[in-house]
Image (cartoon, helix red, strand yellow):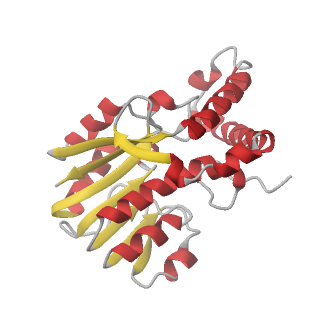
Amino acid sequence: MAKMQTAERVSQTDPSDNYVFQRSLLAYHKAAEMVHGSVLEIGTGSGYGATVIAPHCEHFTTIDKHQGAEEIIASIPNAEYKDMNVPPLRGIESDTYDFVVTFQVIEHIKEDYELVKEIFRVLKPGGKLIISTPNRPMSLTRNPWHVREYSPEEFYSLLSTAFGKVEAAGVFGNPKVMEYYELNKKSVNKIMRFDVFDLQHRLPACVLQIPYDIANRLNRRKLLKGNKELTSSIKMDDYYIAPVGKECFDLFYTAEK
C-alpha cells in the first residue's frame, strides 16, 4: 500500500485527493483575480495556493502552525513564510494588509470570533478578507478534526461580528462532480452503518481523529480504484462560484473593512 497521508491536508500529488484538490484550487484562482498589494494567507498547507496568489500581489506573507512548505515559499521571490499558531496574529501590526486569504482553516480554530477580529485588525481600511470553509449541510459525517462547521447563515453571522459588509457565495459542482459526490455519499453511508451507537457524535474528537483519517483515506482510494476515469477527470473548471446555497460544497465569503 502507498504511504498513508492525512486526508485532512489536501494533496496535489495523491490522485485520490483530486476531487477535493480541484475544488480547493478554484478558491485560490478566484482569490488571485481579486488581490493586489500586500496579502496575508492564514494556512499555508502544502504551499500550492501561494504559487497561485503570490504572482498577483506585491508582497505575500503566509503563516501556518505546521512546517513543510518552506521550500516552495522560498522559491517565490515576493513571498515569506512565518511559523505561527493563530489566533492572535502575533507580531503583525494593525492596518498592514490589503487582503487576508484563508481557506479551509477557520473550522479548525476554537477561538473563531477572536480570529475574525484579528483579521479585521490587520487589514487596512478598505481591505478585504477572502475566506472559505465547508458548508455543513453537505458534510457526510462528523469531521473530528473540525472544531465546528457552519451553515451559510451561521458563517455570515460570525463574519458580521467584525465586518460591516459581507458577501456570501459558495463553491458548487457540475453534474460530473455531483456524480462523484453521490458515489462518495453511498460509500460513506455503508461505513457508517456499523456505527450503530452513533459514536461519531458521542466520543471525544481526539479519540476519533486517527480512525476517521484512516477511513477517509481508504475510502478515497477505494473510490479512485472503482471509478478511476471519473475521479481523475474532475478539473477545476467542473466547479464554479455562485450565490450561496444549501447545496454548495464550500462557503466562499468576502468581507470588507
Q: Which corner quadrant of the image does residue 70 belong to?
A: bottom right
Residue 164's x, y, as percent?
Answer: 14, 45
Q: Nearer the viewer, residue 233 or 255?
A: 233
Q: Residue at x 76, y 52 (%)?
A: 4
Q: Residue furthest top?
A: 196
Is 7 on the left-hand or right-hand side of 69?
Answer: right
Q: Residue furthest front?
A: 175
133 in relation to 182, above or below: below
Is 84 on the left-hand or right-hand side of 1?
Answer: left
Number of callouts in the render? 0
Q: Nearer the viewer, residue 40 or 190?
A: 190
Is residue 91 visible from the viewing direction of this image?
A: no
Q: Nearer the viewer, residue 5 or 54?
A: 54
Q: Nearer the viewer, residue 105 or 92?
A: 105
Is residue 97 visible from the viewing direction of this image?
A: yes
7 in relation to 212, above or below: below
Is 79 on the left-hand or right-hand side of 205?
Answer: left
39 in relation to 182, above or below: below
Q: Residue at x 68, y 28 (%)?
A: 188
52 in relation to 140, above or below: below
Q: Which corner quadrant of the image does residue 5 belong to?
A: bottom right
Q: Residue furthest bottom?
A: 77
Q: Which corner quadrant of the image does residue 169 belong to?
A: top left
Q: Residue at x 56, y 70 (%)?
A: 69
The quarter of the picture where the C terminus appears is bottom left
Residue 38's x, y, as percent?
Answer: 28, 73
Residue 87's x, y, as percent?
Answer: 35, 54
Residue 172's x, y, as percent?
Answer: 45, 40
Q: Residue at x 53, y 47 (%)?
A: 238
